[in-house]
Structure formats: structure tokens, C-alpha cells
Amino acid sequence: MFLRIGPCPNVALTYVNEPESDGIPPTINPVANGPVRMNGDANPLRPVVLLVEDEMFVRMATADALEDAGFEVVEVANAQAAQEVLGRRSDIRVLFTDVQMPGPIDGLELAALVRSQWPHICVIITSGHLQPSGDNLPDKAVFIPKPYGEQAPAQVIQSLIG
């Protein structure tokens, strides 16, 4: 018997009903199967946005707005986690990153790395503390100052990807 439980991003729980052996009960193991949507079917036609934001409530609100606008969203809290996602997923179309976040790499450095290693990915940078000049932004990157309106990220992404 298999039971899949979603919609946690990048994790589906699979329960395998096996008889107990040596008194050890069956286990529930996380299985990395990519994003699992509420209705269970992934749509490969939805553009994928990698959202990098350390403030949980800002990340959740932005992800909800982007999903409502028709995007698939992969959420991470720092640049290191973003690099891991980029290393294993080839379907990321947009990087939407905050500038200041915990860890050795900030959003500007992440944006520059993405621009050099994955030039096909559109880059959007946001911050409520800094307003980087054009010299500090990677080539073709867009800056959105915080606070931004709920629809602003989706509108900018739509304009970038056509």
C-alpha cells in the first residue's frame, strides 16, 4: 500500500505498508520527487520561479501571489539553498532574490553567480534596505524595492519572460 501526502514543496511523504520485522514498525520516508501540487499534478508549462527570501512571511506571501499568477514557485531561505536547487533543477526560469540574508553569500552575489552560470535565467533582485545602483546589478537584472505591491513580482516576471 502506498500513500502519497502533499503538497509540501520538493517533498512527498510515501508510506509503505510493510509487515513489521524484528518488532520495528513501518516507516514514513520523505521522497524527493520535485514539487507536489495540491491537486497532485505538476504542470510542466508553468514557468518556475526560484524565490530566495529569508523572511518567512514575506516569502510565503510572495510565493502565494506568484502561484496565484500561474507560476510554479520553489522557495528557499538563503543563497546556499538556492545554489543547491539550481544544481539539480534545469527548469528554473526566474530567480527572485532578496539582497540581505544569512550565510556567506548575499542576494547580489547569488544574482551575479546565476547570471554567469545560468545566463538563460531571468534575475530579479529586491531589498528594503539597499537600493543598488546599476553598477552593482548583474547585466539585465531588474530591481524591485520593498515594500512592493502584491502583484508587482508577477508583473515584472511576466514582462521578462514574455
Image: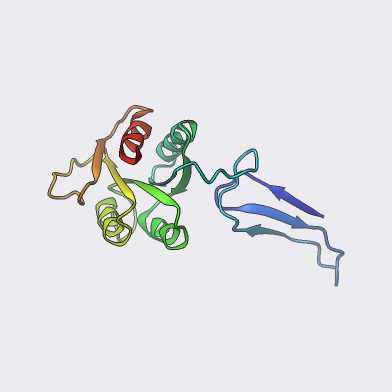
- The front one of 75 and 89 is 89
Residue 89 versus residue 146 in the image, above or below: below
Horizontally, residue 18 falls left or right of residue 126, namely right
Quarter assignment of residue 156: top left
Horizontally, residue 116 falls left or right of residue 93, namely left
Residue 14 drawn at (x, y percent): 71, 55
Q: Which residue does the image show at 65% across and 38% down from the upper left?
A: 39
Q: Which residue does the image show at 31% across and 30% down from the upper left?
A: 148
Horizontally, residue 20 falls left or right of residue 96, namely right
Considering every residue shown, the one lying at the far bottom of the view is: 22
- The front one of 70 and 14 is 70
Residue 71 drawn at (x, y percent): 46, 38
* Quarter that holds the N terminus: bottom right
Q: Which residue does the image show at 47% across and 47% down from the upper left?
A: 74
Q: Which residue does the image show at 28% across and 41% down from the upper left?
A: 126
Residue 111 drawn at (x, y percent): 28, 53
